[in-house]
Image (tube, coloured by chain):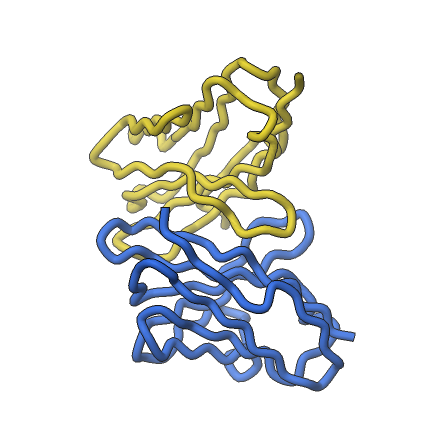
Chain colours: A yellow, B blue
Amino acid sequence: DQQVKQNSPSLSVQEGRISILNCDYTNSMFDYFLWYKKYPAEGPTFLISISSIKDKNEDGRFTVFLNKSAKHLSLHIVPSQPGDSAVYFCAASSSWGKLQFGSGTQVVVTP
Amino acid sequence: GAVVSQHPSWVICKSGTSVKIECRSLDFQATTMFWYRQFPKQSLMLMATSNEGSKATYEQGVEKDKFLINHASLTLSTLTVTSAHPEDSSFYICSARVPATREQYFGPGTRLTVT
């Protein structure tokens, strides 16, 4: 039973435009959410996180939005750059527990 | 962000031998580290949670006698794949949790090939 879902396996976006990645979760006990970027044969790179007491967190080009009532979070990347092409994972945890990962979204940024 | 290293980055071993993979948190102390395995084109699969000074907690279906985990210090956790077989060939990744923030930082991964 997958508690964190990324329903879009891939996303293509033009350089300079906004990338919006979506993530849904089912466990209402999740109170901390993270986004990671991953290149093949490398470990995930931490991008940004958000606690359930907030609905938005921003760090440079990355903004994460959390909608607790909908059990939905999204990652906005503005502007998208060619180096952003990678697989993006969302993850969630509750009470310092282990991370539950989504299945990932492959982002391709085109010139 | 915090830095986590893994060693070796890749290793080839013969079937039946054991292989040790190290995971180090370089600029912070991590009471909790995690070991993951990634199969091709799949998400990360948590194998075990490693707590400094205590026994690791293994996920269901992971053989604790085959995948030995030791977390002897606040900056080092090791995963030993014992009596490796070709089906153990995979990409193993560790992560360390920053105590005050709950952020987890991942190592670069270790590619294990068992021949």
Q: Residue furthest right?
A: B115
Q: Residue furthest front?
A: B27
Estimate the x, y position of residue A36 in percent, counting from the top left.
47, 41
* Front residue (pair A8, B23): B23
* Front residue (pair B34, B60): B34
Query: At 49% from the left edge and 17% from the top edge, which residue is drawn?
Result: A79
Using the image, determine if residue A2 lies above or below residue A54. Answer: below
Using the image, determine if residue A95 lies above or below residue A12. Answer: below
Left or right for B88, reference B100: right
Estimate the x, y position of residue B23 in percent, counting from the top left.
46, 67
Using the image, determine if residue A105 lies above or below residue B45. Answer: above
Estimate the x, y position of residue A25 in percent, counting from the top left.
41, 38
Quadrant where the C terminus of chain A sits is top right
Left or right for A108, reference A95: right
Query: At 59% from the left edge and 36% from the top edge, which residue is drawn?
Result: A86
Using the image, determine if residue A46 lies above or below residue A108. Answer: below
Query: At 33% from the left edge and 65% from the top edge, which residue is drawn?
Result: B32
Which quadrant of the structure image shows residue A65? top left
Query: At 54% from the left edge and 53% from the top edge, which residue is drawn?
Result: B44
Estimate the x, y position of residue B66 in percent, counting from the top left.
57, 81
